[in-house]
Amino acid sequence: MDLPITTSLRGRRGLVVGIANESSIAAGCARAFTAAGAKLAATYLNEKLLPYVKPVTDALDGKLLLPCDVHVPGHFDELLAAEAAAAPEHQLVSIDDADALAAFLVGDVPRRITGNIIPVDGGQHAIA
């Protein structure tokens, strides 16, 4: 079932980790993010998987494709550090941010999201 993308991600950047091939959940997420207007970077596990990941990112006009093996000490930490350096630190959130999340959650797209805590904290939980 195709659901309409009602969230705009124009002007947003994202890093997608875990694309294994065009059928992976991460690839589906990347397609949804791109359809909503985001510009994405992605990672691939190793050279063996690169031929499966590259067509996915090429179709999404991905400009940055980086190796990342979380079993190699420092790989993921380097990616997080680079993202943290580019992200605004300790932005205050407003009631409007919580309102926007609540409005999204009562729509059709997130109908399968249940029993989760979603922090509205300006990204502080994701800072390395």
Image (cartoon, rainbow, N blue to C red):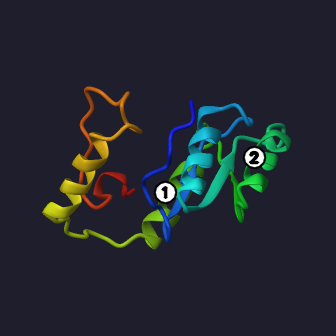
User: Is the residue under label 1 in contact with that under label 2 (CB below 8 Å)?
Assistant: no
Residue where numbered disc 2 is placed: 56
Local SS, label 1: helix
User: In this picture, is 106 found above or below 82?
Assistant: above
Q: Is residue 110 left or right of residue 116?
A: right
Q: Is residue 67 left or right of residue 29?
A: right
Total number of numbered discs in the rendering: 2
Residue 128 at what x, y percent from top left?
A: 39, 56
> Where, by quadrant of the figure, is residue 23 drawn?
top right
Which mark identifies residue 65? none
Q: Nearer the viewer, residue 14 or 6?
A: 6
Q: Which residue sits at x=66%, y=49%?
A: 43
**Crowding at label 1, few (<14), some or many (≥20) Cα neighbours within 10 Å?**
some
Query: Which sits earlier in the primary sequence, circle 2 or circle 1?
Result: 2
The amino acid type, in three-letter code, at marker 1 is: Leu
Q: Nearer the viewer, residue 5 or 53?
A: 5
Identified at 34% across, 31% down, the residue is 113
The residue type indicated by label 2 comes to Val
- Above or below, 38 against 102 in this view is below
Q: Decide which of 55, 17 is in the foreground and name it.
A: 55
